[in-house]
Image: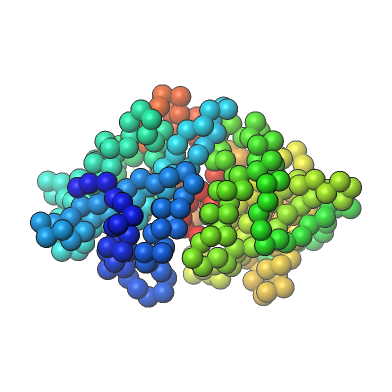
Amino acid sequence: MRRSSPDDAEAIAGLLTTVFGGDGTHEFGAAWWHWKYGSNPAGFQGLVAHDVEGRIVGHFGGILLDVCVDNETLTFAQSCDTCTDPSVRRGLRNPGLFARLAQAYTSTYGIPGGSAVMFGFPNRRATRIGNRYSDYWMLRQQWLLVSQGEASEGVDTGVEVHEVTSIDDDVSALCERLLPRYRCMARRNARFLRWRFLDAPTSPYRITLARSTTDHALRAYAVHRLARLMDNDVGIVVDWLCDPDDHAAARSLQSVVREHYARLGRSIVVFLCPTSSPWFRAFQGFGFRVRPSPYMMTARPFVPQLDPRFLREHWYYTLADFDIV
């Protein structure tokens, strides 16, 4: 085992195609790796395992986030793209390569100056192995907020909502202004958002902004897209940032997003956030209903102040912090 590098991009992509399939659901390739890992402004973490012939047969990746926690910037790492070649799997025995990769990843990066928190939405097999060998902590069973039908609220007279194709520095300013309202949140600055949404090899994301009609100051933004989720073609609000007290901007923004998907014939719109977030209650006030999801939020903190209770109560995340959509 060793740390992964850009030279491994094609081999890692080939391994993931072998494990997860090439049916069009996943588009793996060297360009995909260089975007997802190599171009991430927060950096990347990763381990690979190779056999005596040098063939990469295992991978454990980490997508990094710069997270502001009570005015201190720490690194959170989403564990993802973890897999081993079917020819070397041994299940939970002894343990197998998958478990040993997970242990090595934790011991390599869960150190002072490394990842403060490792997290993810693992599948059942990964959860089982993570619980046994990597001390995964379950934060919550994740719920979804789901609306059906066009919103009826409309746009407030003091708000103008429009779609854009670029992300400017006023988005960074909005994030910095709102960070004190969210005690634990990834920095949603323009650099991160461009990488996450605009630079993706295929970029199906739409960006909608809410501004004041008087001085055009940015008050909120939403990133959304069409996607297949839980056997339905739906509109998904991938990211959402607004002052929790700015009810007019929030109500107007979600209304325009829902109307967009209603015009496309997609009546279902989905949003994901923690139950502790004020948006979990606010979206229910907009007509969204709570529905179960297949996701279980897990995390492993490596610094004392980020115990599971703190993360449950104060960490604000959306699907932008994950690689699912």
The picture places residue 8, in percent across and down from the top left corner, at 29, 57
In this picture, is 314 found above or below 43? above
Coloring scheme of the render?
A: rainbow
Q: Residue furthest front?
A: 7
The answer to whether residue 120 of the structure is visible from this angle is: no
Left or right of 86, for residue 164: right
The answer to whether residue 108 of the structure is visible from this angle is: yes
Q: Residue furthest left?
A: 52
The picture places residue 25, in percent across and down from the top left corner, at 42, 70
Q: Front-most of 67 and 242?
A: 67
| Residue at screen point 76% across, 52% down | 210
Q: How many marks?
A: 0
| Residue at screen point 19% across, 63% down | 86
Q: Front-most of 60 and 243?
A: 60
Left or right of 68, for residue 20: left
| Residue at screen point 70% across, 58% down | 208
The picture places residue 193, in percent across and down from the top left corner, at 58, 51
The picture places residue 1, in percent across and down from the top left corner, at 19, 47
| Residue at screen point 67% across, 62% down | 165
